[in-house]
Image: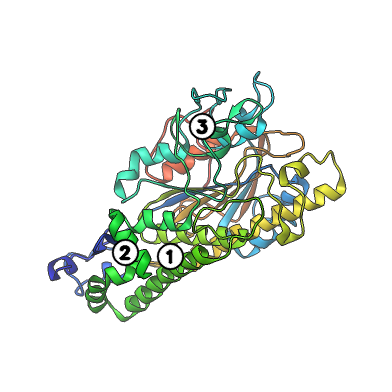
Amino acid sequence: MSRTILSKLNRRTVLRGVGSGLALPLLESMRMPGLLAATTAAPTAPVRMACIFVANGAIMDKWKPTGEGKDYQLSPTLEPLAPFREDMMVFSGLTQHHARANGDGAGDHARNASAFLTGAQPRKTSGADISVGQSIDQAVAEKIGSQTRLPSIELGIDRGRNAGNCDSGYSCAYSSNISWKTSTTPSSKEVNPRSAFERLFGSPETAADMERRLRNRRSILDFVSDDAKRVRQAVSGADQRKLDEYFESVREIEERIARANSSPKDIPDLTLPEGVPAVLAEHTQLMFDILLVAFQTDSTRIATLMLADAGSNRSYPEVDVRDGHHELSHHQNDKDKMEKISRIDRYLIERFSYFLEKLKSTTEGDSNLLNNSMILYGSAISDGNRHNHDDLPIILAGRGGGTIQTGRYVNHPNETPLNNLFLAMADRMGAKLDKHGDSKGVLDLS
């Protein structure tokens, strides 16, 4: 990196090395007059959006807050989000109509995932002729994705598959994906943390470069060290500390990925891809950390994360639930089964809370990453026992760059399209859309 480039340090600056590129977080020095030439105007922090999917619905009477508006009280399930009560909105009454059968019979779980972000009715097929609709993340990426190195990133916890019959005649592609680039092309998710990390920071790495680095266990920071030193010398003391913290977080993620590679894969009857942690909490935390760094560096502004595939029957021994999640969701009002599902619901909210804490504690200019983001959490199934697709469990965290009035529980009239919320999010991303799915207007978030 030359002195000329240093004099034009900006939000898009990338440290370069052999086969590697590492973007920088937003620094005060990018806008301090007199320190670096051509940077006197304060940069505007971009708005990001992430959509996080959970399977099998929720126990809604333990999910829904009480009260309304700003005078709401968090429910037992949502209690772990108490530190972020003023940073989020909780919704009731939102519906994803095309997750319903609408004449197609059974298959609610496949429709749950495939309609969640597309708002479209999936064609019922287990063959190659899959078709649903473009998802909101990809509709936004199509308009603004060129502003970042990656238009979007798609992550998950379950590998899933894109062929075969996974739910009552619906292709596995419907159950395994929430992001669809086109109506017939899912944007397959990455479940291997190393692969996700390399996608963000390793491209365009040759196979030989990657193999050599893995063999020597060298950090990406080793490859961009010369550029990093020059940047560090050119910025303020506060920015030097911020860079040190950022580089440390990158190295920590790499170390955790390396540990995952060498950890014993002792779960019986389960084949884990190389690099995938055997412990669910570690896997989800690592994926959230990768999302954080992706947003912090402006490598992408659009992301999806599936915490499980639709209809997942995973057990959760972390909260002493040995039964399969999907089997429990057909609880038929059995109190013991419902209590176990509530434990799963809260456990997943705790994982979500971890991500929000990381976003909020990451400063960006005069604000933080959470304020400059919109993080949607939810599902297109409400009560897993009834397989209903109205009155969905939906949370929107973050202020969208100061454009969202958070700290509220909003109970919309039932059958309000979830896609109205997606239009509002797209607007704030600078990707105005006239229509998405069965939308009937833009949901008011102000």
The residue located at (76%, 42%) in the rendering is 327
Q: Is residue 43 visible?
A: no
The residue located at (39%, 71%) in the rendering is 246
Q: Is residue 430 above or below residue 288?
A: above
Q: Is residue 402 left or right of residue 226?
A: right
Q: Secondary structure at mark 3?
A: loop
Q: Are marks 2 and 1 in contact (CB under 8 Å)?
A: no
The first of marks 2 and 1 along the sequence is: 2
Q: Is residue 50 above or below residue 19?
A: above
Return the residue at label 3. Answer: 441
Q: Disc 2 or disc 1, which is closer to the eye?
A: 2
Return the residue at label 2. Answer: 212
Image spot of residue 76 (x, y percent): 75, 57
The first of marks 1 and 3 along the sequence is: 1
Q: Residues within 10 Å of mark 1 (few under 14, many from 20)?
A: some
Real-space CA distance between mark 2 and mark 1, rounded to the nearest whole angstrom: 40 Å
Image spot of residue 35 (x, y percent): 21, 75
Real-space CA distance between mark 3 and mark 2, rounded to the nearest whole angstrom: 53 Å
Image spot of residue 105 (x, y percent): 68, 22
Kind of residue indicated by mark 3: Gly
For the N terminus, give its image quadrant. bottom left
Q: Is residue 4 left or right of residue 113?
A: left
Q: Is residue 438 above or below residue 371?
A: above
Q: Nearer the viewer, residue 256 or 67?
A: 256
Q: Are marks 1 and 3 in contact (CB under 8 Å)?
A: no
Query: In the rendered view, how is the structure colored?
Result: rainbow
Q: Is residue 207 visible?
A: yes
Image disc number at residue 367: 1
Q: Quadrant of residue 175?
A: top right
